[in-house]
Image: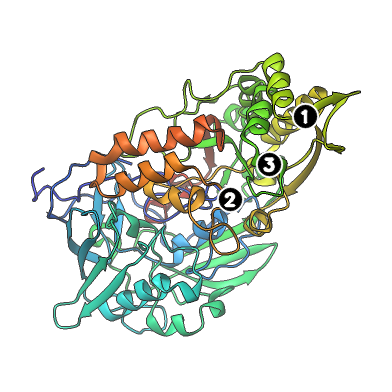
Amino acid sequence: MDTKSGYVPAAVYPVRRRRRLFVVLAVASVASLPLSGCGHSAAKGAGVGAPSVSGKGDPSATVTIGIASDPGNLSPTTALAGTAIELNGFAYDRLIHIDPDGRVVPGVAESWTASSPSASSSAATFTIRPGVTCQDGSPLTAEDVAAEYNYIADPKNSSPMLGLTVPVTAKATADVAARTVTVTTSAPAPFIVEMTQLLPLVCRKSLADPAALAKTSNASGPYQLSEALPGDHYTYTKRAGYTWGPNGSNNAEMPATVVFKVVANASTAANMLLAGQLNIAQVNGPDTRRLESARVAKQSTLVPFGFAQFNEATVRPTADAAVRRALVEALDLKQIGSVATGGTGAPATTIGELAPNPCTGDSVTGNLPAHDLVKAAADLTAAGWAKSGSGWSKDGKALSITQVTSSALGPDASAAYELAAKQWSDFGVKVESKVVDATTVVTTLSGGAWDVAWIPVSVPLPDQLTRFYDGPAAPNGTNFGSIANPDYTALSKQAMAVAGKAGCALWEQADAALVKRVDVVPIVSNQVGYYGKGVAFQVDGSGPIPSTLRAS
């Protein structure tokens, strides 16, 4: 790779762009939330173009964006839900951005260098742009950025961003005179630069009390939170003097005010769009027909959508691989995926990496058990379960599972997972369903009182999935399913020591190991649609990209 090419070896993603992960959460809010790379040792950031926007906007306008659920906690070092990460993308800037072609673009960092990871370490140095400030007027310096790295990296702070925005074992130092932050790790971090697309930058004094930012902001980005009415709306006001957007762009043409309005019902959101009460809203399902008939403009992006994860804690029946396999064999996954996406989805090919991403191989096709009720019954019988009447039992205990679904995925997805529950019930499995929203999904998964979760976990980079499918289980980590897959552990460890795209074959083998053992069940991806009136915008996996908003 030419070290003057302007981007670092590895991957990036326009979905969730620089800013989000969604543990939708899809995380991705998370996220939400792609590209090329090669394994050279010292690539340097340069001036690649910012996201393109056609025409000028009305800088005095107010743009209202519908969101399906309240974001809950907005503290940027702890917020993991997709809606919260979306809102924080308007308030907190990033060291780097991603342009529509997937190239790394300078942001608060005007340049950077990175070394290829070894088996035991990685390193990167970022040069901080002068003149960056937080909303209280205090400068955002190299010392502030280093302090945030070290805060998230310190296990005692229990930041869920560790491993997502900051590499595990990271240590940061600042050179005040040179305006540089040097990040080193004692473990390999193959995407050490690209991870910063998710790091919301806060001034150092906010780290003394991060909880204070739960419903306010000390913003480093183009907007600051000026009003928060939980359950109803969140108002963001444009900051003056902002000149450190993608590739040094400013917010002069962006609307003066952005209001995020909580609208839980998709039909209501569609009605409000048509009536001019919303400018932008994500709408899926049958209401899209009305919007398209009215020729409401649409932007869309492909995201992981139909997805199941099993809870393998020892007290759960799904700890047994035979039970997991039988449960999948009892389902018609093709039918469930079709219902979930209204027939518009595409078969899943990844376990959660947002497209486009550096690794384009298919880790899913051919690795999931086929729909086969006879085989499902045989697998349960071999594992010691017996059919008694209409149900299965073992040691006097009925096979009963609790499934968790997200209200944020819309009515089609809800219908699909009701269908899954019926297919399991018809097979003889008792099913209890729990519905969660963006404010309760993480706590529900962490609580462990579930067996299967229809909750996509979406990230831009493959190494970021390791914290969800390996390592400590909740409450000590975010391995919500208590997964301990030795093949995934070994393969991902090997992949971590390879820079960027060069490690894709190993990452894809690691992902496939999770699918083959039925730890995770990717079913379908879907084009998530955002409709807009009176505004031009581009989207990624979590919603409108702030720097592209133009009110007409």
**What is the three-letter code of the residue carrying label 1?**
Trp
Q: Using the numbered discs, state the Cα–Cα distance from disc 3 to disc 2 in whole angstroms.
A: 34 Å
Q: Residue at x 29, y 75 (%)?
A: 132
Is there any visible trace of residue 96 in the rendered image? Answer: yes
User: Disc 3 on helix, strand or loop?
Assistant: helix
Q: Which residue is mark 1?
A: 385
Q: Which residue is mark 3?
A: 266
Q: Which mark is residue 461?
A: none
Q: Which residue is mark 2?
A: 482
Q: Residues within 10 Å of mark 3 (few under 14, many from 20)?
A: many
Please tell me which of labels 2 and 1 falls first in the chain. 1
In percent of width and height, residue 411 lies at: 71, 36
Please tell me which of labels 3 and 2 falls first in the chain. 3
User: Disc 1 on helix, strand or loop?
Assistant: loop
Given residues 433 and 366, the one toward you in this image is 366
**What is the three-letter code of the residue carrying label 2?**
Ser
In percent of width and height, residue 45 lies at: 17, 56
Judged left or right of residue 14, residue 261 is right
**What is the three-letter code of the residue carrying label 3?**
Ala
Q: Residues within 10 Å of mark 2 (few under 14, many from 20)?
A: many
Given residues 26 and 489, the one toward you in this image is 489
